[in-house]
Amino acid sequence: MSTLVLVHGFWHGSWCWSEVVPHVVAAGRPAVAVDMAGHGLSARRPRWFTEQPYDPEAVGTEVSPVADVSLDDAAESLTARLKRIGGGEPVTVVAHSAAGPVLTRIAQRTPELVAHAVYLTAYMPASDVPAVAYTQIPEAADSLVVPLLRGDPARIGALRLDFATGDPAYRRQVREAFYSDVDPALAEAAAGLLTPDSPVGIMLGTTTLTHDGWGSVRRTYIVCTRDLALLPDVQTRFIAEADAAFPDNPTSVVTLDASHSPFLSMPGELAGVLTALG
């Protein structure tokens, strides 16, 4: 079976897969988690995040140090890693949340690198539609993420969370949005590892999908039915749009009774799903 390459979503890093990888490897499947551009070891924190005293005005206005990271940049970075990891052979890419558009771009441009495209409660935008458009559809109206954002993304170049605020209610809202079914101590630890800025350019980019590109790649969508960040109705819309556009290559669907972060709430069960993928 092909190597699993695990890609995190916005504000996270490769660390979020640390509970999943041991289960996958123990089952005999090679797996590696990588950082997306502008995240993890390539994350850059704005000045307001560490400066004292805390400046709420700067939170909403300071241009992000990752504002120049585009969908192209993220795709090029991940493509280089896939080539290195696969050694010329295709790999199975598991994209969580906002890593979905990056996987879509890669599968369209270099389908020979992707043995299986797996979207874990991830954005899977239709042809020529930016991922950000799905945050504005009726099905997304009750997402808990949008109320957490600070500043105008068009001005600051990022989707920004304010982890410097001392407001305990805000931190509870973050945990509820991403980790509602995660053990509270683990959820608090994970929230402490999140970075404040994710590049809005990844969500603004679009990809033209074709039958011999993305439409030719085997794909699976893992629906998380208790997700309060990327709501289940939005997830099912992605699947419906993909299957309408490429009916000869329908999406395989797996359902988990999980929140937005099953890699923390049910790592063993998620690993079982992933290792079973061909």
Image (spheres, rainbow, N blue to C red):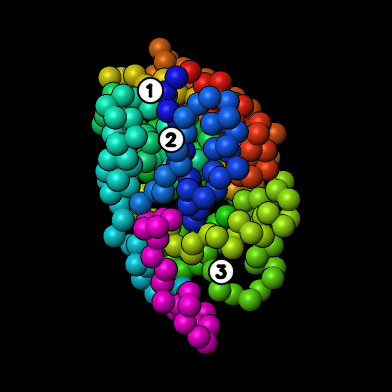
Nearer the observer, 87 or 211: 87
Q: Secondary structure at mark 1?
A: strand
Mark 2, mark 3: which one is toward the viewer? Answer: 2
Q: Position of residue 141 (x, y in %)?
A: 59, 48
**Residue contact between numbered discs 3 and 1, judged by CB atoms under 8 Å:** no
- The residue at which mark 3 appears reads as 163
Real-space CA distance between mark 1 and mark 2, rounded to the nearest whole angstrom: 11 Å
* Residue 22 falls left or right of residue 64: right
Magenta span includes 41: yes
Residue 211 shows in the view? yes
- The residue at which mark 1 appears reads as 115
Image vertical order of residue 150 relative to residue 274, above or below: below
Magenta span includes 243: no
Residue bounds of the magenta highlight: 38-58
Q: Residue furthest bottom?
A: 53
Q: Amino acid at mark 3?
A: Phe
x 33%, y 30%: residue: 86
Mark 1, mark 2: which one is toward the viewer? Answer: 2
Res 232 → quadrant:
top right
Real-space CA distance between mark 2 and mark 3, rounded to the nearest whole angstrom: 29 Å
- The residue at which mark 2 appears reads as 5
Residue 245 shows in the view? no
Q: Secondary structure at mark 3?
A: loop
Image vertical order of residue 229 relative to residue 214, above or below: below
Q: Position of residue 84 (x, y in %)?
A: 29, 36
Q: Position of residue 64 (x, y in %)?
A: 37, 67
**Residue contact between numbered discs 2 and 3, judged by CB atoms under 8 Å:** no
How many numbered tags mark residues here? Answer: 3
* Residue 236 falls left or right of residue 36: right
Q: Amino acid at mark 2?
A: Val
